[in-house]
Image (cartoon, rainbow, N blue to C red):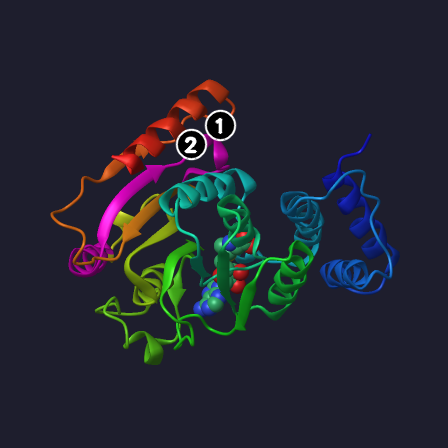
């Protein structure tokens, strides 16, 4: 028997494939709206979970992205999203209400994975510049009944968002072309354009509450680039580096695209001294035993 996720994908795919003229991703949005309004429904065998819905939509979006979206709009892969979700849930455990921000939310796949991992009491803000991705994310949030405020804008411009408990972000990597705006940041480059991934870190730190955490998917070479000096200086002054977690090479087709996870904390008077930095490597994801030992070590580190 097909799972809920498969049935949701089949429903969206059948609906979207019937429209031979429009863009597939637009039709995915239409399919989700038809489901929301009750006009057409997927066949669901048991009580549907938020994760069933997220995964079903994700499969359709992946198919759509192969057809029309450029590589810089790539969704955060599920394996990485699940890991970040685990870290996020552990870092905010015991909190009744958690406010989250993803300043480069794309389809919302990473944000929803994290929200679903944290569970009840989480409210999020999502910023993204690409309008079609925002519409996709918004209809997904409605279907999952996840409370998310959406902002369609350049996330490096002023944000009307109150400080949050946690930021999660698969950082857009590259140069930020808007020098006029970039000069407002400490991490503006001395020469040429600033790195947008640096500015996203700075912008999100500005929107964190004291003691709040930022969890970022970063290029593995972040601390070795020609602008790394600016980053080191900024972090020393404005953040506490809590963890740098290397992801397994097997997740990336090419060494140039390798990523790590960086966990920062915004300084607060409650944090005395300088906590040790966790420097570790995620084992091969296909080894269940090694993965569960790794997650247990992470949890123990948080509980220390
Ligand atoms: N986590 C997302 C997901 O699961 O779909 C993927 C994020 S993708 C790596 C980075 C996103 O940042 C892209 O969707 C891109 O359009 C967006 N982006 C890049 N520069 C931006 C900017 N200045 N302001 C807002 N969004 C931006």
Q: Which residues are magenta?
A: 228-255
Q: Is residue 153 left or right of residue 221?
A: right
Label 2 secondary element: loop
Q: Residue at x 49, y 27 (%)?
A: 285
Observer able to see residue 75: no
Contact? badges 1 and 2 (CB < 8 Å): yes
Label 1 secondary element: loop
Q: Is residue 232 left or right of residue 55?
A: left
Residue 20 x %, y %: 86, 60
Residue 8 x %, y %: 76, 46
Observer able to see residue 29: yes
Marking on residue 285: 1
Which residue carries the number 2 mark? 248
Depth check: give the residue in front, 269 or 243: 269
Residue 90 x %, y %: 39, 41
Mark 1 and mark 2: span between their CA atoms?
8 Å
């Amino acid at each position: 028997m097909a799972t809920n996720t498969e049935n949701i994908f089949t429903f969206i795919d059948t609906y979207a494939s019937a429209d031979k003229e429009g863009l597939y991703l637009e039709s995915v949005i239409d399919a989700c709206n038809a489901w929301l309004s009750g006009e057409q429904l997927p066949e669901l065998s048991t009580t549907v979970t938020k994760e069933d819905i997220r995964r079903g939509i994700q499969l359709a979006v992946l198919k759509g992205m192969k057809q029309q979206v450029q590589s810089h709009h790539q969704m955060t892969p599920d394996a990485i999203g699940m890991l970040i979700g685990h870290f996020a849930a552990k870092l905010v455990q015991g909190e009744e209400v958690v406010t989250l921000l993803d300043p480069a939310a794309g389809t919302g796949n990473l944000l929803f994975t994290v929200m679903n991992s944290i569970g009840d009491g989480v409210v999020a803000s999502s910023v993204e510049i690409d309008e079609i991705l925002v519409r996709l994310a918004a209809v997904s949030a409605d279907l999952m009944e996840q409370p998310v405020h959406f902002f369609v804008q350049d996330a490096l411009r002023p944000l009307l968002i109150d400080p949050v408990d946690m930021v999660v972000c698969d950082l857009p990597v590259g140069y930020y072309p808007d020098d006029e705006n970039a000069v407002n940041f400490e991490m503006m480059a001395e020469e040429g354009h600033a790195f947008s991934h640096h500015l996203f870190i700075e912008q999100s730190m500005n929107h964190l509450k004291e003691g709040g955490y930022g969890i970022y998917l970063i290029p593995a070479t972040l601390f070795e680039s020609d602008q790394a000096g600016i980053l080191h200086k900024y972090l020393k002054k404005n953040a506490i580096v809590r963890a740098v977690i290397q992801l397994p090479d097997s997740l990336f087709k090419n060494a140039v695209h390798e990523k790590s996870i960086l966990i920062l904390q915004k300084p607060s008077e409650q944090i005395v001294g300088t906590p040790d930095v966790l420097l570790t490597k995620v084992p091969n994801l296909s080894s269940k035993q090694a993965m569960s030992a790794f997650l247990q070590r992470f949890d123990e580190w948080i509980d220390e």
